[in-house]
């Protein structure tokens, strides 16, 4: 007899005053709110080298870049099926991976336009991670209603996400990974290490996109190109974008291991 550690049935949609709550949507908005408030809190505590006007322009660039590429990347997750959907469906269909990379490109474009030379990512890093954690909890509570569930599995982590089948709870895998990464980056900020401005954001992007590349093998993706899902292709593009940072990190680790 199969067992699961799941305590509440999924999707989790509590009814309050006769209204069924969409917990995924609620937590998605909560993720934006808490993430932004955390960013404001961190900026007040830090000596930000970027002016308020430039920082606002950078945020606007990130928002529009994220809005565009999050929808485009989601469309290409299954273009054959999505092309038959109406415009409203495709505008509401989005993915965090496209949002992150689109936000990055939007920021870089705005910085070139306004002539900002300083790296702007580190201040966003922890708020972004916190926001994704909250959002992924919402994805988990949505069960199989959101395409953040995994393939069938007999592994001990398998859970019934709402369709009576034990599946990889991919959203929880991400929550665990990002929680550990959040703690690591917090500790790295306190250590007296020779990080360049922007390195912590690059560390987050490289590690998270690497994780997502691997996790995609656990998802029942309906569409592949060259044997990879569209998200995996996007992950590879991001890793190529950060190739200099990756090579610098490999060189740094090799030197440390040589000294040992």
Image (cartoon, rainbow, N blue to C red):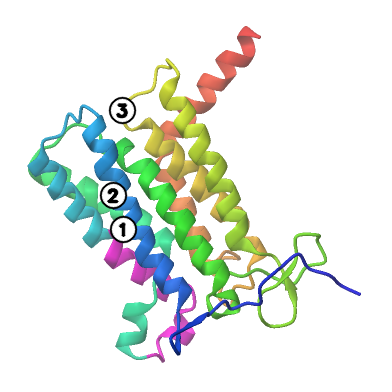
**Above or below — where is 78 with respect to 232?**
below
| Magenta highlight range | 66-85
Q: Which residue, as the protein is rendered here, is positioned at the far top?
A: 259
259 on left or right of 116: right
Pinpoint residue 248: horizontal percent, then vertical percent.
45, 26
**Above or below — where is 169 with respect to 84?**
above
Q: CA distance from mark 3 to mark 2?
A: 22 Å
Q: Is residue 75 magenta?
A: yes
Q: Which mark is residue 33?
A: 1
Q: Earlier in the sequence, mark 1 or mark 3?
A: 1
Mark 1 in CB contact with mark 2 (< 8 angstroms): yes
Q: Is residue 233 visible?
A: yes
Q: Which residue, as the protein is rendered here, is positioned at the far front?
A: 17
Crowding near the residue tagged with mark 3, few <14, some 14–19, many ≥20 C-alpha atoms within 10 Å: some
Pinpoint residue 160: horizontal percent, then vertical percent.
72, 74
The quadrant holding residue 149 is bottom right
Callout 1 secondary element: helix
Instruction: Determine which residue is flagged by label 3.
Output: 197
Pinpoint residue 3: horizontal percent, then vertical percent.
84, 70
């Amino acid at each position: 007899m199969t067992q699961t550690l799941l305590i509440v049935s999924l999707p989790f949609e509590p009814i309050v005053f006769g209204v069924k709550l969409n917990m995924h949507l609620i937590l998605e908005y909560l993720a934006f709110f808490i993430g932004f408030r955390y960013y404001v809190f961190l900026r007040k505590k830090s000596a930000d080298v970027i002016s308020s006007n430039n920082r606002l322009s950078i945020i606007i660039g990130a928002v529009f870049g994220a809005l565009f590429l999050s929808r485009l990347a989601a469309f290409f997750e299954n273009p054959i099926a999505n092309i038959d959907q109406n415009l409203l469906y495709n505008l509401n269909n989005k993915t965090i991976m496209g949002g992150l990379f689109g936000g990055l490109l939007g920021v870089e474009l705005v910085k070139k336009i306004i002539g900002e030379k300083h790296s702007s990512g580190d201040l966003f890093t922890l708020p972004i991670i916190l926001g994704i954690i909250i959002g992924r909890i919402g994805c988990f509570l949505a069960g199989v209603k959101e395409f953040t569930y995994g393939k069938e599995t007999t592994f001990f982590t398998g859970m019934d996400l709402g369709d009576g089948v034990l599946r990889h709870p991919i959203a929880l895998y991400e929550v665990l990974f990002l929680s550990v990464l959040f703690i690591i980056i917090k500790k790295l900020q306190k250590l007296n290490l020779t990080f360049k401005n922007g390195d912590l954001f690059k560390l987050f992007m490289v590690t998270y996109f690497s994780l997502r590349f691997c996790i995609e093998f656990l998802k029942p993706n309906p569409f592949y190109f060259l044997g990879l899902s569209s998200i995996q292709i996007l992950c590879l593009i991001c890793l190529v974008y950060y190739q200099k940072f990756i090579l610098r990190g490999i060189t740094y680790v090799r030197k440390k291991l040589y000294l040992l």
